[in-house]
Amino acid sequence: MSAPQEYVEVFKPTSGRILGVVGVLVCAGVVAIALVDPGSGIGVTGIAVAVLVGVLVHGSMLKPLVRATDDELELVNLFETVRLPLAAVESVVVRQVLAVRVGDKRYVSPAVGRTFRQALRKPRSTRELAMTPVPGEGLVAEEGMSYADYVEDRLREMAAGARSRHRVKIASPEQAALAADVVRRPALVQIGLVVAAGLVALLSLVLG
């Protein structure tokens, strides 16, 4: 893919932030108590479990992010960051998570989603779900429009703009070829911490 461009849109996470902060603080507190007071009874197993839970809470509730340049969409998730060409996007749907289809693959992000009740509401109309936006619509959040609807409209608009600039039609061979430009970069730090903390917790239980 081309060199990184400036992000023109960063979509705010829709849920889990407060709970995530509380969860990380609790885990950090457990580790701090164990280190400051060796007689607290928390021990190595407790520290390892706290680190493991803290990393998972941070990665699933605080880290996820959806942002885009003029030509690329970036999904920052727990164990990986996915960059995909906007011109390759075939569909965008926000239910309880954001789902983007490129070629025969579906990429999801928990950063933007609907509550269970919102996900059960009446589906949007065919016009609202169309990949090609109606001129003058979908650019700003209208009164009464949910943020999830705005994200759907905005991403569809950006995908349509990218296809227009690159002269790519939906379901064309050119669009299918763009699927090869999807880049998946593993989050080595999170993966390493989860594996290390998990192994320490397991070994301490087995040997203790």
Image (tube, helix red, strand yellow):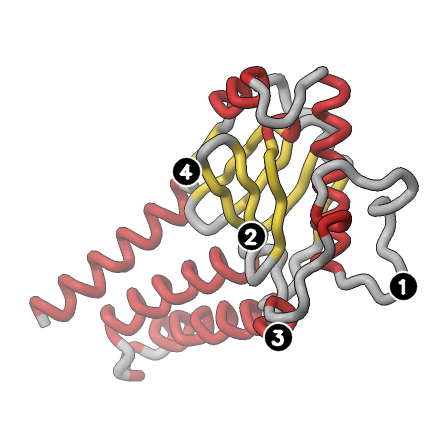
7 or 71: nearer the viewer: 71
Earlier in the chain: of badge 2 and badge 4, it is: 2
Q: Quadrant of the N terminus?
A: top right
Mark 4: amino acid: Pro
C-alpha span from label 4 to label 1: 39 Å
| 41, above or below 114, in the image | below
Residue located 15% across and 67% down the image:
204
Are discs 1 and 3 less than 8 Å apart at CB?
Answer: no
Please tell me whether mark 1 sits on a helix, a strand or a loop: loop
- Labelled disc at residue 143: 1
Earlier in the chain: of badge 1 and badge 3, it is: 3
C-alpha span from label 2 to label 1: 27 Å
C-alpha span from label 3 to label 4: 33 Å
Mark 1: amino acid: Glu
C-alpha span from label 2 to label 4: 13 Å
Q: Is residue 35 left or right of residue 105?
A: left
| Residue receiving disc 2 | 64
The quadrant holding residue 116 is: bottom right
- Mark 2 crowdedness (10 Å alpha carbons): few <14, some 14-19, many ≥20: many
Which residue is outermost to the left? 207
Earlier in the chain: of badge 2 and badge 3, it is: 2
99 or 25: nearer the viewer: 99
C-alpha span from label 2 to label 3: 22 Å
Earlier in the chain: of badge 2 and badge 1, it is: 2
Residue located 89% across and 63% down the image:
143
Q: Is residue 41 left or right of residue 133?
A: left
| Residue receiving disc 4 | 186
| Residue receiving disc 3 | 117
